[in-house]
Image: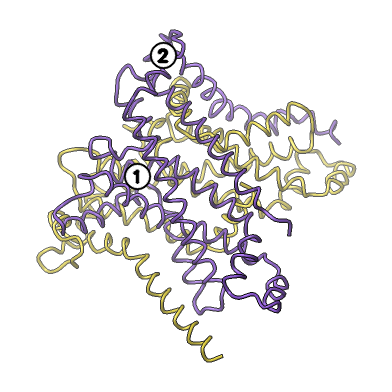
Chain colours: A purple, B yellow
Amino acid sequence: MEKAIKRYFPIFLLPTLAAFMIGFIVPFLMGIWLSFCDFTTVTDATFSGLSNYVKALEDTIFRHAFWYTALFAVVSLVVINIIAFAIALALTQKLRGTNIFRTVFFMPNLIGGIVLGYIWQLIFNGILAAYSTALNLNEWYGFAGLVILVSWQQIGYMMIIYIAGLQSIPGDVMEAAAIDGASGPQRLFKVTIPMMMPSITICTFLSVVNGFKLFDQNLSLTAGEPSKMSEMLALNIYNTFYGRAGWEGVGQAKAVIFFALVIIIGMFQLRATRSKEVQQ
Amino acid sequence: MKRKEHLSKLGTGLFTFISIFYVLPIVVVLFNSFKKKSYINLEPFKLPDSTTFVGMGNYTTAIDQYGFLKAVGWTVFITVGSVLVILICTSMCAWFITRVQNCFTKGIYLLCVFSMVVPFQMVMFTLSLVTDRLGLGTPWGLIIVYLGFGAGLAVFMFCGFVKSIPIEIEEAALIDGCSPLRMFFSVVLPIMKPTYISVGILETMWIWNDFLLPYLTLDLKKYKTISIVIQYMKGSYGRVDMGAIMAALIMAVIPVVVFYLSCQKYIIKGVAAGAVKG
């Protein structure tokens, strides 16, 4: 059978492959190469070794953005997952109207980051105005705002994954634990949570990676105000590329660092939670 | 037994309360969209009254002055076009690289998986250079870019499904004299229908809401998407028309909510399927 379909290679493979080259492989390789170059357009690129990386790491705003982003990723990870798990637990009990609640909680997930940012900007500024201040006056207002916004957006998504996980726990396991006299909290921590580790792995992975990659919401809610203090990594890279002439190489070097960071953190996180998964 | 019933009622009450709280931000924007623009920042939590009410004024401003409907049109075109092209091309690609096993096809698979974790910032600058050089700064060109950048997730999900299809069905079709192409469309494609829906949903959610990729690659003088128009309205310093922005936000949310309510079942299934594999 392989031989018969091999001749059809151009029809099956070529369109995707060509687009994949244009959309991913070529830009990716060019990006790696250009991070070692000085350039404003590609044609005048000259090799400059590691100087872009040195400049990137010396940039105090970039370093600030890194810690700000890391803190954000951790806080949003904890908030989103605890609330989503609690809601999923509650909604798998026999409650009236669970379907409606599920529908409501998931909805914000479908709205785009830019739109969400401006919706919440109105709300936060409306509340803060009562205390005669505003979102763009303090970086921690922006931080709290982003955590609330992202939780609002992603809790529903994680909830769906947790509900799917909870529903796949075999009923006899829970029954056995109850007959053996395990109390409610014991059943939760000794049976449910260990059985749920695969879902927890996925959700924590997604929320930490999403936290690091956050861009649209950051741009629309605070745009880095006050004076770049609420700027996260992705926005910082964007502003280095398009806001500072002559810094394109540094921007690309930052992008490579960012890419490496996301990969390392993702791997590390997967390892940490995978090791706690149990055989069902 | 009585106690349990009470608890259940309490739970329903609690969640009703939280749900109302959950949709409140959108409701606030909704009633602000009917206010005069100068009152929106002053008193955002007050309902419009006889002095502040402007009727549909903000909506007509957003449509007439900022070309909102045109942006909706282009967003629909780009989303529908890209998703259809992605579904057809990547499913064919995934089927091929699963059925023909050699170093080359394995390499493609690994590259696809790899591309899923690469953040967009890594390639955004060079991607905009490439698309500029190739003249892909049109909605039609953007479809090709989306096929390339969105291929990773789609190929990955389709491959996972193709592996579970028994190869005997396909062999039987080939022996009966079916060409591979026809076999793909009349045998494989119908079997993969659930995966088509899941992948389609995930890609639709991504492309519809995407901001940075079209912002960097599209020729913005001619074409804008919904997210870009809203960013323009807010980003143009000086005169920011809050009224028009409120109206635009509502008009951006309405199609999403309609889409969600009409295919909620598939969306939730798609999300769960995508997550398990991701």
User: Marks 2 and 1, how far apart in space?
Assistant: 45 Å
Count of numbered marks:
2
Callout 2 amino acid: Ser
In which chain is the residue bearing label 2? Answer: A
Q: Which of label 2 and label 1 is nearer to you?
A: 2
User: Where, by quadrant of the figure, is residue B224 drawn?
Assistant: top left
Instruction: Give the x, y percent position of residue B163.
Output: 76, 45
Q: Is residue A21 above or below residue B204?
A: above
Q: Residue furthest left?
A: B51
Would residue A230 appear left or right of A134 to someone viewing this image? right
Q: Secondary structure at mark 1?
A: helix
Residue in view at x 50 percent, y 79 percent: A96
Q: Residue at x 71, y 68 (%)?
A: A170
User: Residue B121: x and y, percent?
Assistant: 44, 31
Q: Residue A119: where, in percent of width, then height?
A: 30, 54
- The residue where tag 1 is placed is B70
Answer left or right for B274 relative to A47: right
Closer-to-camera residue (B194/A88) = A88
**Amino acid type of disc 1?**
Lys
Which residue in the protein does label 2 denote?
A51
Quadrant hosting residue A245: top left
Give the residue displayed 51% in from the left and 36% down from the top: A262
Task: Classify mark 2: residues with Cα within 10 Å, few (<14), some (14-19) or many (20+).
Answer: some
- Quadrant, the N terminus of chain B: bottom right
Residue A160: x %, y % from top left: 54, 61
Q: Nearer the viewer, residue A37 or B41?
A: A37
